């Protein structure tokens, strides 16, 4: 326990770093630095930072393994939670500034515009991950079940990048870059599984 | 001469408010541009030209009482993909475009094809028109343009009986327009109108904005305004106008035919997969407001479409 505790500071640092884009956004909004259409920009930036956060969450495990730095594994949860915060704020900003919190408008939007539906499904899938993000939940669900539930993040991040891709009018290259990063990160997991499977089979022989 | 050094028409901002240059600089520029034709680039470190215009105040039919979008907001929020896909790109990169000399070639199915020098076109009686402009992306502005009706140019060309459409082409100059170096859209940018739409009194060719020559970012030296249609129909930096028998290909329709129709009339009842067309955000205003059919120009334009299903011909 004693050797563990001093590292707690890293949680705060991770949360603080993850909060930087939000602080910047709020300050820029306050100062009128978000351009000519600040509300639209605010919605877009919150969503983008949420997506970037999710990708960063998925990067931690490969980094920990390739860099032989297992300690950073514990950053996944605060990074993931902060990403969920951005996505929640993104949804709130959209509902408030775009729809004026009119639920009928929301239903219309969901039925008319596929990219909104994709984003909303992604958001709904995040909720169980957020509410089971504390240690006791792992005990209640048992680790294997918890892990299975948390692996929904792969579906969420794919929905997230799809949501982003679908709303771009013409220049799709940034969305494709995010998509490629996600493909590599998912590929890493598949490769690992395959290696593990191969190892097991070899062992059985 | 079109240069005016007296104070602007009352009710407008002063020159110092609408342009970063001082009055003296404008006078110098004007003289250099219009009188001597001397190299302007050295004096302002840009190829664009500025200057104030003489024009008639808008008639009641072509004005509105809504508040005007400030010039800096117009310049810093523009879709002009020839300079980049970000709406702030034109303000950063459009100065690279040389707008003098400039020719507009009018041809195709007409009796009097002619290539006009921009200075000749500027000699048309200029008038101001305050038009709402509604972007397909769900935002809008209200802008005081200066120019002349498109019908002036159409009638001068005397289109033949075969001519049914008018095709427009922007300048193609990848050396000066950095966005044209990537193939986001097919270059040059193309637009088109039905001949009766082009002859409608609302259709307008602008050479100025807020009493001054058009900034490069807004389509200098000459651009179209068809405010009852989504903004992308109002083609910028026009180099060619051609009368055709068949409906001409247009840039966004070619890119995504299911999303951007040839007509693209502002229509709150026809939705786009990405943007709700029922409401719009007027730039510089907080709450969204309902979008009007034909962007509020129905009384002048609706009759042209009375036999058409606008959900089919969107």
Image: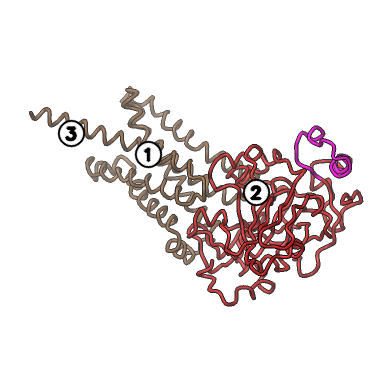
Chain colours: A brown, B red
Q: Nearer the viewer, residue B31 or B218?
A: B31
CB-based contact (under 8 Å), mark 3 and mark 2 = no
Task: Give the numbered dot on residue B77.
Answer: 2
Residue A144 falls left or right of residue B230: left
Task: Give the numbered dot on residue A182.
Answer: 1
Q: Is residue B158 visible?
A: yes
CB-based contact (under 8 Å), mark 3 and mark 1 = no
Please tell me whether mark 3 sits on a helix, a strand or a loop.
Answer: helix
**Residue at image point 24% right, 45% down:** A140
Task: Give the numbered dot on residue A138.
Answer: none
Q: Are marks 3 and 2 on the same chain?
A: no
Boundaries of the magenta span: B25-50
**Residue B114 placement: quadrant:** bottom right
Residue furthest front in the image? B111
Q: How many marks?
A: 3
The subunit carrying tag 3 is A
**Residue at image point 77% right, 63% down:** B156
CA neighbours of label 3 inside 10 A, class few (<14), some (14 to 19), many (20+)? few
Q: Nearer the viewer, residue B10 or B119?
A: B119
In the image, residue A30 sits, relative to residue B41, either above or below, namely below
Please tell me whether mark 2 sits on a helix, a strand or a loop.
Answer: loop
Chief secondary structure of the magenta span? helix
The subunit carrying tag 2 is B
CA neighbours of label 2 inside 10 A, class few (<14), some (14 to 19), many (20+)? many
Q: Are marks 1 and 2 on the same chain?
A: no
**Residue at image point 52% right, 36% down:** A20
In the picture of the structure, the residue carrying the numbered disc 3 is A197
Please tell me whether mark 1 sits on a helix, a strand or a loop.
Answer: helix
**Residue B182 placement: quadrant:** top right
Classify the position of the C terminus of chain B by image quarter: bottom right
Q: Is residue A116 magenta?
A: no
């Amino acid at each position: 326990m004693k050797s563990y505790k001093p590292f707690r500071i890293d949680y705060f640092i991770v949360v603080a770093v993850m909060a930087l884009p939000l602080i910047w956004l709020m300050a820029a909004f306050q100062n009128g630095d978000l351009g000519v259409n600040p509300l639209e920009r605010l919605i877009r930036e919150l969503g983008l930072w949420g997506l970037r956060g999710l990708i960063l969450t998925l990067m931690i495990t490969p980094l920990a393994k390739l860099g032989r730095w297992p300690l950073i594994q514990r950053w996944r949860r605060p990074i993931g939670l902060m990403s969920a915060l951005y996505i929640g704020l993104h949804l709130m900003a959209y509902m408030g500034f775009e729809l004026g919190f009119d639920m009928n408008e929301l239903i219309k939007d969901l039925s008319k515009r596929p990219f909104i539906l994709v984003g909303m499904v992604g958001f709904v899938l995040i909720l169980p991950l957020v509410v089971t993000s504390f240690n006791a939940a792992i005990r209640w669900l048992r680790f294997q079940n918890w892990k299975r539930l948390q692996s929904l993040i792969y579906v969420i991040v794919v929905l997230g990048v799809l949501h982003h891709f679908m709303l771009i009018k013409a220049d799709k290259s940034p969305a494709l870059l995010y998509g490629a990063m996600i493909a590599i990160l998912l590929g890493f997991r598949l490769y690992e599984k395959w290696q593990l499977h191969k190892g097991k089979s070899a062992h059985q022989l | 001469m079109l240069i005016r050094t007296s104070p602007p028409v009352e009710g407008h901002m002063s020159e110092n408010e609408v342009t970063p240059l001082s009055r003296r600089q404008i006078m110098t520029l004007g003289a250099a541009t219009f009188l001597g034709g001397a190299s302007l680039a050295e004096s302002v470190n840009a190829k664009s030209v500025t200057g104030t215009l003489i024009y008639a105040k808008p008639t009641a039919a072509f004005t509105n009482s809504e508040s005007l979008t400030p010039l800096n907001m117009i310049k810093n929020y523009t879709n002009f993909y020839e300079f980049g896909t970000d709406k702030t790109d034109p303000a950063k990169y459009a100065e690279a475009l040389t707008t003098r000399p400039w020719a507009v070639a009018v041809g195709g199915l007409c009796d009097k094809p002619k290539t006009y020098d921009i200075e000749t076109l500027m000699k048309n009686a200029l008038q101001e028109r305050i038009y709402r402009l509604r972007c397909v992306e769900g935002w809008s502005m209200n802008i005081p343009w200066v120019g002349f009706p498109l019908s002036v140019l159409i009638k001068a060309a005397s289109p033949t009986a075969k001519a049914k459409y008018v095709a427009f082409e922007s300048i193609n100059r990848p050396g000066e327009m950095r966005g044209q170096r990537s193939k986001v859209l097919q270059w040059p940018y193309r637009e088109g109108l039905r001949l009766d739409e082009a002859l409608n009194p609302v259709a307008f060719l602008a050479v100025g904005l807020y009493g001054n020559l058009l900034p490069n970012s807004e389509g200098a030296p000459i651009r179209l305004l068809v405010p009852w249609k989504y903004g992308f129909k109002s083609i910028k930096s026009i180099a060619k106008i051609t009368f055709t028998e068949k409906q001409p290909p247009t840039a966004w329709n070619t890119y995504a035919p299911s999303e951007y129709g040839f007509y693209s009339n502002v229509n709150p009842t026809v939705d786009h997969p990405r943007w709700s067309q029922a409401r719009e955000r007027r730039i510089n205003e907080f709450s969204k407001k309902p979008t009007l059919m034909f962007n509020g120009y129905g009384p002048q334009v609706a009759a042209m479409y009375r036999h058409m299903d606008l959900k089919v011909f969107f």
